[in-house]
Amino acid sequence: MHKPAHVFAAVRFRAYALGVLLVVANNFWLMASATWASGYPTTVSLFHHVIFILFVVIGMSALGRALPGYRRALLNRAEQVVLYTMLCVASGIGGLDLMQVLGTFTNGLRHLATPENDWDALFFRYVPDWLVVGDVGSIKALADGGSSLYTWPHVRALLPSALVWSGFILVLSVVMLCLTLLVREQWTETEKLSYPIIQLPLHMTTRSSALFTNRAMWLGFALAGMANLLNGLNFLYPAVPGVGGKLYDLAPLAPNPPWNAIGWTPLSLWPYAVGLAFFMPLDMSFSAWFLYLFWKLEMIAGRAIGLQRLPNFPYIEAQAAGAYAGLCVLALWTTRRHLRAVLRGDPRIDYRTPRVALIGGAAGVAALLWFCMALKMTPWVAALFTLGYFVLSLGITRMRAELGSPVHDLHRAGPHLMIVDVFGTRALSTADMTALSFHQGYNRAYRGHPMPHQLEGFKLGEQSRTRPRALVLAVLLASALAPLVSFWALAHYSFRHGIPNVGKVPESFGRLAGWIAAQTAPSAGSSLAVAYGAAITLLLAALRARYVWFPLHPAGYAVTSGWSINLFWCSIFVSWAAKLAILRFGGLPLLRRAQPFFLGVILGDFVVGSLWMLRGAVLEAPTYRFLF
């Protein structure tokens, strides 16, 4: 039997039109902020600048509602969700871990090739002309600044690579969308995962009246906003006292071995991180800080027994890759019956959308493989890389839906690096390694990965009675527009001020030169670490299934392996302790009354922080960065 039909809210053309305009403005804002290092909002799971834009739109709607004759012009809840989803997907594409890195590869690679590094002789014969900017005059103008994009020679020089990579990113996002449509019903409606990250946009869109009339929310807003304001003024005028916002490293307290193996261990307290962690399930927030300390203990134990002599011990990046692969396996295992029903055409479910998603996903993967072949990648390397990327994508998305961690980065754990580590450079051709280095452009880290935002958009749509087709169109529009606008914005600011984040080019292609020279053998340590990470993840899942009381979640093991968790573990601990105390002494009634306060803490920090970031973009000047 088919599920009963839902009554969906209308999504009018004006919502998409406004979304397109805001995507353009949003992605220019992101590139301007990257140019002046005034903010990288896509490094945190919930994008503060999108929350700010949504806050402004809702505020304007409230003002419009008070004016006679303007009710029809307001965006309804479904339209607000569509707008939010478009901006999140566009920001994930235009953010630090995708376009702000990939764009520097296309625009800056040939500029940074010098006689000293000999890149030209080492690998440039494997770089097609349509992949990067090749015109000498445009390259010099991009690097030096003080020029303008808006001349035909410059546009002509940049257009081929911009169109090629924009098409690639669109196909990549479409495959993510197809995967999202395949798992959405199982994860959202059957398993009813908690989606902690979207609690603020959920309340802002579907429960706005209750949220914006709550005094506790405004108290949290005022406290966090005032702290952010003072810190921003302290940045501009040091005589103004700041309120926190600093890192205190514990490592100097342990100078002697084996304790000095603990490495960088900062103590920091970020109001928005405390607020975000408050909405994580209690066992998951416990896992997030406890397993972070476990990783530190692992390094100390390794130093104590002499394992630090092994290169790369304790292989944290390889363990992380294995852990996320384990999460993907667990996610597919819980979804197996749904996928089997889709493949069989079970009449008890509406299998048409998943069937279309299967066909679209297969076609998209074929296109991605074709692109890899055009870069002269060996077929098995192209297939393994593509599989690895989407395994990580599913694992990250599942972790977000369950754990809701404020960050997830996986620096140096992408499939392009794991393939080299596990198989060694001797098993790969120079063309393979060159192509893998270009794929670093969207695999350097995964903090702003677009796929979780796609799934979270559908969850918000379910709560706001938004038709799924409306969200599919929103994701497709954002995915098609965002890379083009990001290339445009990056070129606009690069011709004026020089290429931002240009240091990401030698990071990737300097490593490529080292790969070509080194000719390494397969790494047994990396292979075992990947298997170990996956095994620990599956073991934790089995223990949770067997013992209800078992407190450690496998997603916590995966997310605490990343670099960014160093900055947030203390905030997560404080939030966990506060939530535990509230439940112990006040129970669920007090917890419900406390939730608006923590929503206000997030919102106040985000709104004032976004104003600082906007100041930096408009004035084209450095400003206070309230994110790490």
Image (cartoon, rainbow, N blue to C red):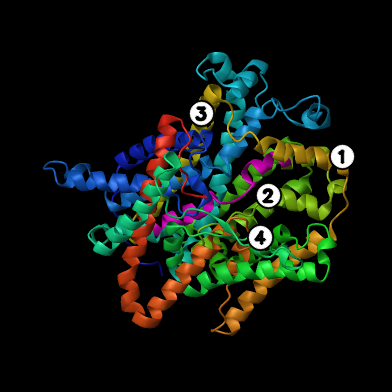
Label 3 – label 2 distance at C-alpha: 27 Å
Q: Are discs 3 and 1 less than 8 Å apart at CB?
A: no
Tell me if residue 263 is in the magenta stretch. Answer: no
- Disc on the earlier residue, 3 or 4: 4
- Disc on the earlier residue, 2 or 4: 4
Q: Residue at x 57, y 49 (%)?
A: 175
Neighbor class of circle 1 (other Cα within 10 Å; few <14, some 14-19, many 20+) is: few
- Disc on the earlier residue, 1 or 2: 2
Label 1 – label 2 distance at C-alpha: 26 Å
Location of mark 3 (residue): 488
Q: Is residue 417 above or below residue 623?
A: below
- Residue 197, given in percent of the width and then of the height, sits at 45, 60
Quadrant in which the N terminus appears? bottom left
Location of mark 1 (residue): 517
Label 3 – label 1 distance at C-alpha: 36 Å
Q: Amino acid at mark 1?
A: Ala
Q: Quadrant of residue 217?
A: bottom left
- Disc on the earlier residue, 3 or 2: 2
Viewer-nearest of discs 3 and 4: 4
Q: Are discs 3 and 2 less than 8 Å apart at CB?
A: no
Q: Residue at x 34, y 38 (%)?
A: 18
Q: Are discs 1 and 2 less than 8 Å apart at CB?
A: no
Secondary-structure class at tag 2: helix
Location of mark 2 (residue): 386
Q: Amino acid at mark 3?
A: Trp
Secondary-structure class at tag 4: helix
Location of mark 4 (residue): 252
Q: Is residue 437 above or below residue 307?
A: above
Q: Is residue 401 above or below residue 365?
A: below
- Residue 595, given in percent of the width and then of the height, sits at 34, 67
Q: Residues in magenta?
A: 437-462
